[in-house]
Image (tube, grey):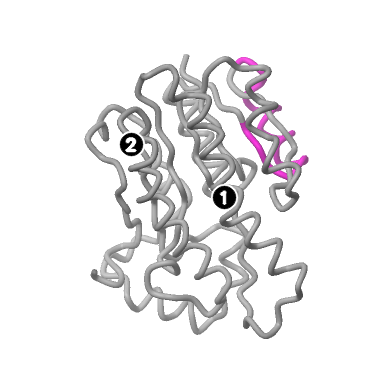
Amino acid sequence: MKKILITGAANGIGRATTIRAVEEGYYVICADKDADGLATLNEIYGQEHIETHVADFSLFNTLSSFIPRLYEQHESIYALINNAGIYHGKSVYLYSHEEIDEIINVDLKALIYLSKDFAEKEMKFESPRCIVNISSVAGEVGSCDALYGATKAAVIGLTKANAWNFAPFIRVNTVSPALIHDTAIYDTIPDYRRNEYARQEILKNPIMPAGVADVIIMLISDNARHLTGKLIPVDNGAYPR
């Protein structure tokens, strides 16, 4: 049974991906700061299918030590899905110093540390491994939340660079969703931005977390064995580019 690590696993895209991964026969290591959400997953699936770790990736000690500590328990992990993220949906003028540090830590620095530490542990096996980063259409076309847009743009650049850094054994791709319904972030997006996303979409079936999870699972499968350094939009055809 292949083991995969999903951050932000308790809710939204992370939870949907955990569910799909278990269905596909993966053993899922779930990390999130939401202890209650993780407990719910544990009640559903149990230790036979998942293990959970309460982790706050806004804290430097967590993001810098999480992978080394995990490998004290696991010899090898097949895939890393960097999903944990923060969105405030407010003007850059309204960010506090602490919030700036927090969003950069969670939305970017965590991906840097987790990815490099994962690659360092797994490259020695010289066998196929995967990293999937979660970016956003906001990283491609901009965002009313400048810090969120900036970090998601950086995730795209990090994905391309690490595809080179970790080749030929670790494939690195990013998924770029547009407006995703039924998530905590959805309710914090200003109405005018939600309306603009909806106007741009040429497919009208609302994007749900499960739809993004399907793409993530495809990217870690052998069906995507020739893909690395790629950005895969999940956006109902919005913002043609």
Query: Relative to residue 49, is residue 101 drawn left or right?
Result: right
**Residue at image point 59% right, 55% down:** 85
Q: Residue 110: percent from the left, percent from the top?
A: 61, 48
Mark 2 packing: few (<14 Cα in 10 Å), some, or many (20+)? few
Q: Secondary structure at mark 2?
A: helix
Give amino acid for label 1: Gly
- Quadrant assignment, res 48: top right
Name the image quarter holding residue 62: top right
Residue at image location 46% in from the left, 47% down from the top: 133
Q: Which residue is mark 2?
A: 218
On-image quarter of the C terminus: bottom left
Check the image and report above or below for 174 versus 121. Answer: below
Question: Does residue 240 belong to the magenta stretch?
Answer: no
| Amino acid type of the residue tagged 2 in the rendering | Met
Q: Is residue 45 magenta?
A: yes
Of residues 205 and 122, the one nearer the viewer is: 122
The foreground one among 113 and 78 is 113
Find the magenta span and give its range: 30-48
Q: Residue at x 51, y 29 (%)?
A: 120
Estimate the spatial distance between the alpha carbons at disc 2 and disc 1, rounded to whole Å. Answer: 18 Å
Residue at mark 1: 12
Residue 115 in the image: state x and y as whole percent. Answer: 51, 40
Labelled disc at residue 31: none
Q: Nearer the viewer, mark 2 or mark 1?
A: 2
Q: Quadrant of residue 94?
A: bottom right
